[in-house]
Image (cartoon, helix red, strand yellow):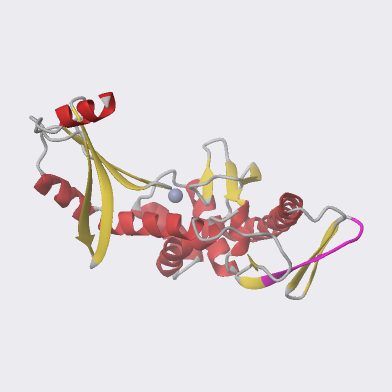
Amino acid sequence: MANQIRAQLELPFAPLSPRPVVACSTVLDGQAVSYVLHRSHGRRRISLTVDERGLRIGAPLRISMREIETVLREHARWVARKLAEWGEKHRPGRRWESGEILMFLGRPLQLSIAAGTEGVARHESTLLVSTQRAQAENIAALARAWLRAQALSDFAIRVARYRQAMDIEPVDVRLSNARTRWGSCHASGRILLNWRLIQMPARLIDYVVVHELAHLREMNHSPRFWAVVENEIADYAARRREIRRDAHRYIVD
Ligand SMILES: [Zn+2]
């Protein structure tokens, strides 16, 4: 009874200012997109966040819906891409069972699990994982370790090839496990390449390798930087677009 009274008392109060949190929807590039809008006093700017909960927008309290829509439209492509990435991640996850497909150098690799001495080997388009512990986490760990080892040796060969062609000397090349970057480069001369790149076609890995090496000459994305990249990879712009378009496929664990 007490609960009912409290609930009734709330009804007559209309919000005096825009409600701080409200569910909205809009159409971006022909796609219906719903989002949660958080307004607050403290905010000066509009921020967009996409994560497992979907799109959220943070905004100053008094900003108009029209301004919010304008910002959304300006970032429509980014929003669509991020939502697609999260959509992919939310597909039923990999179960690490026989028959599942991994990607390796742009080609499908079918997982085959067998009982035996722990080890991983590739036979043409099959990745054979043998183990006595067939739990998903163990299979995943073994397959990932194999992919990382392949990545390390594959990237080393590519770096060696391009460092010579470009006459650029990295001091060190390591694998990264970053969630948001394919590669990075440090002023010290160290290059980090994401092990997940090993899933991509070789031509895309080459582009990332060349991109990071080029940063050792130009620590920026100036026309001079792109000229260094283009000198090695004439169609770099197409490869770059391809990576952006397909990135969500390769961000999986
Ligand atoms: Zn860069």
Say which of 217 and 199 sits in front: 199
Where in the figure is residue 40, as x and y percent of width and height?
20, 29
Q: Residue at x 24, y 30 (%)?
A: 4
Closer to the camera in the image, 230 or 45: 45
Image: magenta residue range:
109-117
User: Any magenta on residue 233?
Assistant: no
Residue 208 shown left or right of residue 227 in the figure: right
Asked whether, in this view, residue 134 is left or right of residue 239, the answer is right
Residue appearing at x 56%, y 69% in the figure: 203
- The quarter of the picture where residue 238 lies is bottom left
Residue 30, relative to residue 95: is it above or below? Answer: below
- Residue 180, above or below 151: above
Residue 3 percent coordinates (x, y): 27, 27
Along the viewing direction, whichever of 188 and 128 lies nearer the viewer: 128
Height in image: 94 above or below 217?
A: below
Q: Quadrant of the N terminus?
A: top left
Q: Is 176 rendered above or below residue 240? A: above
Residue 134, image x, y percentages: 80, 56
Magenta highlight: main SS: strand
Q: Residue furthest bottom?
A: 124
For image coordinates 76% across by 53% down, the residue present is 135
- Name the side, left or right, on which 157 lies relative to 192: right
- Res. 143 image quadrant: bottom right
Towards the viewer: 106 or 208:
106
Judge left or right: residue 246 versus residue 39: right
Is residue 111 rendered magenta in the image? yes
